[in-house]
Amino acid sequence: MASATGSCRSSPDGVNIVRDALSGRLPDGTSVELGTVLIVDDTQAGVVALELACGSIPGITVRAVRSALDAVKLIEAGGPLCAMITDIRMPVMDGFELIRHFRGDARYRRTPIIVITGDTDPDTPDRAARLGADAFFSKPFSPAAVRQTLKRLLEADRDA
């Protein structure tokens, strides 16, 4: 059984196997561990929907937390993360501050970030992008669209 592991970074010869994993075209008996996606949402419904969307991507492990403060603890612990999906409006620390903290850690400067929020402020998407978010979805969101965007960002991250 062939295996590739890591934190969503690969050598040039690992790019094709990552693309094959993301597209579901791996040969039988081949497994690829692409890494862990951190989901940060204070609502159970949001966590469940995102776990279902991301967990169906071959090679992805999902880790969900219900607060930005819990996410900061994981980030500071230094575990390998290949992407983060976060809500914006959360108690104590919001998603903007979480993104700022995440991007401030050299290990995660290029790691894809997807924002999913019910925030209706028209400036929110631009503010999230300025802080380093790679994609933005308003609630309610399509899990399939989030999954496709995550796959695209992970593939682009591997090519970089």
Image: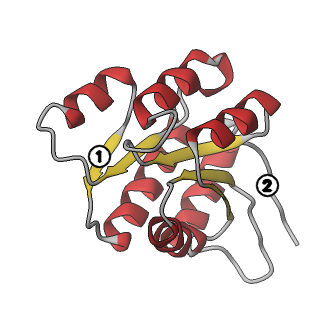
Q: Residue at x 49, y 39 (%)?
A: 112
Closest to the observer, 66 or 22: 66
Q: Earlier in the sequence, mark 2 or mark 1?
A: 2
Q: Residue 19 in the image: state x and y as whole percent.
A: 54, 58
Q: What's the amino acid at mark 2?
A: Ala
In percent of width and height, residue 101 lies at 56, 22
Q: Position of residue 86 (x, y in %)?
A: 46, 47
Q: Give the quarter of the image for residue 13.
A: top right
Q: Spot the residue most to the left.
A: 122
* Rendered position, 4 above or below 52: above
The answer to whether 109 appears left or right of 138 in the picture is: right
**Kind of residue at disc 1:** Phe
Q: Secondary structure at mark 1?
A: strand
**Which color scheme does this rendered protein use?**
secondary structure
Element type at mark 2: loop
Residue at 75 percent of width and 40 percent of height = 80
Residue denoted by label 1? 136
Q: Residue drawn at (46%, 58%), measured in percent from left and top?
A: 151
Q: Residue furthest right?
A: 1
What count of labels does the image hold? 2
Quadrant into which the N terminus falls: bottom right
Image location of residue 135, percent across then percent down: 33, 43
Above or below: residue 107 compared with residue 83: above
Q: Which residue is mark 2?
A: 4
Which residue is pictured at 60% across the width and 71% down the height?
A: 55
Query: In the rendered image, is residue 8 in sight?
Result: no
- Residue 122 falls in image quadrant: top left
